[in-house]
Image (tube, rainbow, N blue to C red):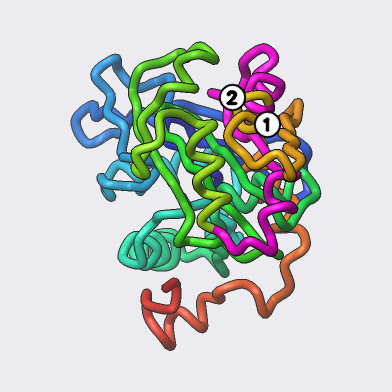
């Protein structure tokens, strides 16, 4: 289950594409929840900044997912995505809902930007993930997220032009995605900057703009020291790259990687920290 800021993508491990994609919209007809396209225009989004903030509606999105996939939740191990700035409390609450309300057999909580990098067959790089007005720049070294260098922004104006993406204010006070990428890399140790500049990966449907990789490459080159080579990778399937990375990862995880129902029952929701 890939929970994006404005849509959810769901399916099975090792599949090449999501089985279903639907808008994160929930409305209520009495006690009945209407999800996705079935929700009225007044339907609300239970996510803010890519993380759940309405747990009742979030629970209905999960219920809708199991219904679409036509599976018994108690028989499923579930990989779910999170943003790189998701809180421990949110992870614990997600685990609680999946185990206690749906009785799943195991869970794995994976960061969406890492999954996007993984889908590009890399374990080191910088991911610029942009979707639904939410933006994250995430440097990753050998699968480890460098949290001190993460940059984020939220801007509800969409759709965007390439020029507008170059002017979005980020939390680091940068003036656009090119500045965010540059500053994130420069916050990292000098010994890995060469590799990071050469592995800048775009992810999310907001990055589906003509020639964006070449525009970004030019802009970042103008910021970076001339000794660095800059490469921007824009995978053709990048609108689904976080889900695709999750599908691949879910098929590779061993029993030791998952949080089992037994482990949850023993340790409680804090096991998801």
Nearer the observer, 59 or 33: 59
Q: Position of residue 229 (x, y in %)?
A: 76, 40
Q: Is mark 1 on a helix, strand or loop?
A: helix
- In this picture, residue 210 sits left or right of residue 7: right
Residue receiving disc 2: 207
Q: Say if residue 75 shows up in the picture.
A: no
* Residue at position x 67%, y 54% in the image: 193
Q: Is residue 257 left or right of residue 233?
A: left
Residue 182: % across, % down: 55, 41
Closest to the observer, 231 or 221: 221
Q: Nearer the viewer, mark 1 or mark 2?
A: 2
Q: In which quarter of the image is the C terminus?
A: bottom left
- In the rendered view, tell whether residue 206 sits above or below residue 273: above
Mark drawn on residue 238: 1
Secondary structure beneath label 2: helix
Query: Callout 2 environment at 10 Å: few (<14), some (14 to 19), or many (20+)?
Result: many
Which portion, as a residue range, is magenta? 188-217
Viewer-proximal residue among 123 and 37: 123
Report the residue that reaches farthest toward the left: 30
Residue density around tag 1, few if under 14, some if 14–19, many if 20 or more, within 10 Å:
many
Q: Can residue 164 be seen in this view?
A: yes
Residue 109 in the image, given as x and y percentages of width and height: 53, 61
The reply to whether dot 1 and dot 2 touch (C-beta < 8 Å) is yes
Q: How many marks?
A: 2
How far apart, in angstroms, are the residues tagged by discs 1 and 2? Answer: 8 Å
Instruction: Give whichever of discs 1 and 2 has the lower sequence position.
Output: 2
205 drawn magenta: yes
Out of 145 and 242, give the one closest to the viewer: 145
Could you tell me residue 146's position as x and y percent?
A: 54, 62
Q: Does the magenta stretch include residue 214?
A: yes
Residue at left 48%, top 42%?
136
Q: Residue at horizontal 61%, vertical 32%?
A: 220
């Amino acid at each position: 289950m890939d929970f994006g800021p404005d849509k959810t993508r769901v399916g099975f491990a090792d599949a090449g594409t999501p089985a279903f994609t639907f808008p994160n919209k929930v409305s209520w007809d009495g006690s009945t929840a209407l999800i996705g396209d079935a929700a009225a225009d007044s339907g609300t989004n239970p996510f803010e900044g890519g993380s759940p903030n309405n747990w009742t509606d979030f629970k209905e999105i999960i219920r809708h997912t199991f219904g679409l996939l036509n599976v018994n939740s108690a028989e499923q191990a579930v990989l779910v995505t999170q943003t790189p700035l998701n809180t421990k409390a949110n992870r614990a609450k997600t685990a609680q809902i999946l185990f206690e309300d749906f009785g799943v057999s195991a869970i794995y909580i994976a960061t969406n930007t890492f999954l996007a990098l993984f889908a590009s067959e890399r374990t080191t790089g910088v991911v610029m993930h942009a979707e639904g007005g939410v933006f994250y720049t995430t440097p990753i070294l050998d699968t480890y997220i460098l949290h001190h260098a993460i940059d984020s922004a939220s801007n509800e104006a969409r759709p965007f032009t390439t020029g507008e993406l170059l002017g979005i204010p980020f939390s680091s006070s940068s003036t656009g995605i090119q500045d965010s990428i540059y500053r994130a890399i420069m916050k990292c140790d000098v010994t890995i900057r060469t590799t990071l500049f050469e592995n800048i990966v775009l992810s999310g449907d907001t990055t589906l703009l003509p020639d964006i990789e070449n525009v970004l490459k030019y802009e970042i080159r103008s910021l970076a020291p001339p000794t660095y080579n800059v490469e921007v990778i824009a995978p053709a399937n990048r609108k689904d790259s976080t889900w695709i990375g999750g599908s691949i990862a879910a098929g590779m995880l061993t029993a030791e990687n998952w949080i089992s129902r037994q482990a949850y029952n023993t340790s409680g929701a804090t096991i998801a920290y």
